[in-house]
Image (cartoon, helix red, strand yellow):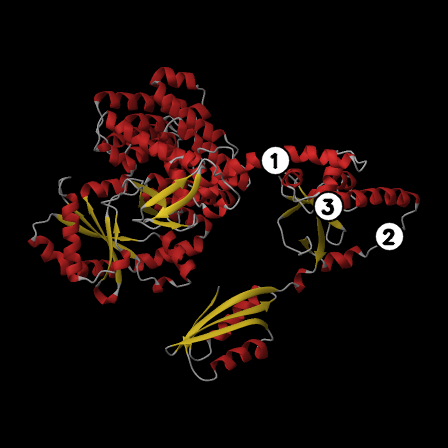
């Protein structure tokens, strides 16, 4: 690089630094600026010899992350300094002790958390990814800012991913959708969550993304005209009340439109609620609620509201701190429009999440605010020993689920995810209350424990010292907290009964002249069609495997032992040669088990099976199903030591495989239509129909047909042909 280029780059770095201070959302004191300056100088020095894949100096990345933290998320000086230093310990010669010495314990703790996350394995399957996610969440124990800076880091990586190879773009985008977007949503960073989802779609489905993006651009003028016509109608009424406000429209994100197109099976033009209208008003904190309802009253004077779609998050804010009044009204041109009513303070909280919440608090109050929020997240993390994939799935359910608000008998308001039951409520009150639940009353009436709660319900839990969790409770509970506690208790109980069962089994087998060892246990697991030895011991412990059943096993075991020695004496017949080429060309797909299911598998390297070989599947602990040849050197060892993990497998001809598909049709009912549809399917296209269901209502019809096809091409052609029939409005695959 020339001297002139280096000087130009240095000027740009200095400019970016000044902008970082200028755009900071929190007010920075002299000490704050000093801390940020020191962090900036250390970061510049540490990364001076590093460059990104795009060729630019590496330091631009930490500065960009710090700018996101300072402006878009709005955190404090400690966070900004930590963001500048977030890659220093991982990538350079500086150590954590250096950071602690120079910047103090808080910055060192955050940088340490960020370094731990970076050290987690990069190439991973889904369960490793889930495990890493859990480890990442557990760093919240140290400092919530670790997660927030990590989200900002990922956000900037997503913004600058163009120079990466395609497979990495897809992997990082998928991980972002799986982990970081739900987290941003949970923290209340709605803008960043939306950006992360849109950017992920850009790399996972580029054609779809560009198509929707171009259509959004084309419809911008039309949308603005609609917002103006809406504003004109209520403008005078709002001004008469002396309100100071702005009205603006917000387009739905590309990702959410894509989601709607998929779930509702509609095209872009068929989505009616492509945007929401926001009315943001000036107000003192005392008058906020009063003015929100006043604006609600004015809007509904002019436009008819949809009574089912009123959301009052001012009286009961979301657990993220979000406050607003949402109403859906019938706007101009007969379109449903969502109207969001917020004060300027509420708008800041919606844009910045928790940071804005803390801006209006001072000193101890600010610290307590973070603590309360941390504790809420901590509840979902309490059982760190559960299966990692279940943990992530349950955690994600709680992240994205809508909330309901229910009352305790004393009138205290509790927030629960939508779909929660009285059992979830009891665990929300306290783990001990949950464990001792005997029954529940909702609004004074005794109800089953699996009753779905609704906002406004008053719930009373009846407890008993004799009550304890049972297997059915897992069907009654929906929240991660309740399910993890119930699973934990059931596991412990099963282990305890299993230990007793093992001793009972040892005693009963001894009377049959059989010693309980690994081989006998494996054979019993197979004999009783179970999955694990614990299942076996547990069933003996509870008596569902009784004396007679154990005797039946003993006699089959002894007979098998005798016939084994007889067979050893006989010579095995030599198998005939197989025409490998013929079989390989035809039988190219593996299916497993009696049901001949298609499952994910890998071919074992110890014997390299090819299509046509006689094979079996072995369920390994960490690598899923591994396929071995039946004459593999390891086959005997696997089949004798781990018989309960063996799964039958065979090759089949994939070209002959048939698939079931459900097609839904809607249209205008007329005579002979059903006959025309069935002729088209079975007569013209020779496709088999398995199920046919038509219903008519007020001159329209709705039909559902199950067809059996060999591939997607035939199905697409069938759908196109059905669309040509007169009277049919829509044909879609379910």
Rendered view: 656 above or below 65: below
Find residue 18 and report its horizontal and vertical position in percent: 26, 29
Find residue 95 and report its horizontal and vertical position in percent: 44, 19
Q: Quadrant of the N terminus?
A: top left
Residue 156 horizontal side relative to residue 502, left or right: left
Residue 729 horizontal side relative to residue 508, left or right: left
Mark 3 neighbour density, 10 Å: few (under 14) some (14–19) many (20 or more): few
Q: Between disc 1 and disc 3, whose residue precedes? A: 1
Q: Which residue is mark 1?
A: 497
Q: Which residue is mark 3?
A: 549
Going by the picture, which residue comes out furthest to the top?
101
Q: Which tag is nearer the camera, tag 3 or tag 2? A: 3
Q: Which residue is mark 2?
A: 575
Q: Dot 1 lies on which element?
A: helix
Mark 2 to mark 1 CA distance (whole Å): 48 Å
Find residue 648 and report its horizontal and vertical position in percent: 71, 50
Residue 518 horizontal side relative to residue 565, left or right: left
Q: Dot 2 lies on which element?
A: loop
């Amino acid at each position: 690089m020339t001297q002139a280029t280096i000087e130009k780059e240095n000027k740009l770095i200095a400019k970016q630094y000044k902008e970082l201070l200028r755009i900071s959302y929190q007010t920075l004191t002299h000490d704050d600026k000093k801390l940020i300056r020191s962090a900036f100088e250390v970061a510049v020095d540490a990364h001076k010899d590093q460059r990104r894949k795009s060729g630019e100096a590496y330091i631009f990345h930490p500065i960009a992350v710090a700018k996101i933290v300072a402006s878009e998320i709005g955190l404090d000086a400690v966070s900004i300094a930590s963001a500048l230093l977030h890659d220093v310990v991982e990538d350079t010669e500086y150590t954590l002790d250096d950071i602690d010495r120079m910047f103090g314990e808080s910055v060192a703790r955050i940088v340490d958390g960020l370094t731990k996350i970076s050290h987690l394995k990069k190439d991973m399957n889904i369960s490793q990814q889930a495990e890493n996610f859990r480890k990442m969440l557990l760093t919240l124990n140290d400092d919530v800012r670790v997660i927030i800076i990590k989200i900002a880091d990922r956000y900037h990586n997503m913004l600058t991913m163009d120079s990466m190879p395609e497979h990495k773009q897809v992997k990082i985008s998928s991980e972002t959708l799986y982990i970081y977007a739900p987290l941003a949503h949970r923290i209340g960073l709605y803008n960043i969550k939306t950006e992360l989802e849109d950017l992920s779609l850009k790399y996972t489905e580029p054609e779809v993304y560009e198509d929707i993006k171009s259509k959004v651009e084309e419809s911008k003028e039309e949308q603005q005209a609609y917002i103006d016509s809406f504003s004109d109608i209520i403008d005078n009424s709002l001004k008469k009340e002396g309100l100071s406000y702005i009205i603006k429209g917000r387009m739905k994100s590309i990702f959410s439109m894509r989601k709607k197109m998929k779930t509702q099976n509609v095209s872009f033009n068929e989505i009616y609620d492509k945007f929401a209208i926001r009315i943001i008003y000036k107000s003192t904190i005392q008058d906020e609620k009063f003015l929100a309802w006043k604006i609600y009253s004015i809007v509904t004077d002019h436009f008819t509201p949809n009574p089912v779609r009123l959301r009052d998050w001012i009286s009961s804010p979301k657990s993220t701190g979000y406050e607003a009044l949402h109403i859906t009204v019938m706007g101009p041109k007969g379109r449903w429009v969502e109207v969001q009513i917020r004060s300027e303070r509420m708008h800041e909280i919606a844009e910045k999440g928790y940071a804005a919440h803390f801006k209006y608090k001072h000193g101890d109050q600010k610290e307590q605010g973070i603590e309360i929020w941390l504790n809420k997240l901590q509840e979902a993390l309490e059982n760190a020993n559960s299966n990692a994939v279940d943990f992530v799935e349950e955690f994600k359910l709680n992240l994205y689920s809508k909330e309901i608000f229910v009352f305790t008998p004393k009138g205290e308001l509790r927030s629960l995810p939508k779909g929660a039951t009285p059992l979830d409520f009891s665990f929300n009150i306290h783990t001990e209350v949950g464990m001792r639940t005997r029954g529940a009353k909702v609004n004074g009436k005794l109800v089953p424990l699996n009753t779905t709660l609704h906002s406004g319900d008053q719930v009373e839990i009846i407890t008993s010292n004799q009550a304890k969790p049972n297997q059915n409770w897992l069907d009654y509970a929906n929240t991660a907290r309740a399910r993890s506690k119930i699973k934990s208790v059931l596991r412990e109980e099963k282990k305890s009964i299993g230990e007793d069962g093992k001793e009972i089994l040892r005693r009963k087998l001894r009377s049959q002249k059989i010693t309980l060892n690994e081989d006998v246990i494996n054979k019993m697991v197979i004999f009783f069609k179970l999955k694990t030895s614990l299942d076996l011991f547990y069933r003996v412990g509870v008596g569902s495997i009784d004396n007679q059943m154990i005797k039946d096993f003993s006699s089959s075991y002894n007979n098998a032992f005798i016939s084994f020695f007889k067979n050893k004496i006989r010579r095995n017949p030599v198998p005939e040669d197989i025409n490998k080429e013929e079989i390989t060309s035809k039988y190219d797909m593996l299916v497993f088990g009696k049901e001949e299911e298609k499952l994910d598998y890998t071919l074992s390297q110890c014997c390299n099976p090819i299509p046509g070989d006689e094979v079996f599947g072995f369920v390994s602990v960490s690598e899923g199903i591994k396929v071995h040849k039946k004459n593999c050197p390891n086959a005997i060892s696997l089949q004798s030591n781990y018989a309960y993990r063996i799964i039958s497998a065979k090759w089949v001809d994939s070209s002959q495989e048939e698939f079931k598909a459900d097609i839904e049709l809607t249209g205008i009912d007329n005579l002979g239509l059903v006959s025309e549809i069935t002729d088209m399917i079975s007569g013209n296209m020779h496709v088999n129909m398995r199920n046919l269901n038509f219903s008519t209502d007020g001159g329209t019809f709705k039909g559902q047909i199950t067809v059996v096809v060999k591939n997607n091409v035939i199905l697409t052609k069938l759908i196109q042909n059905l669309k040509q029939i007169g009277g049919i409005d829509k044909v879609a695959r379910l």
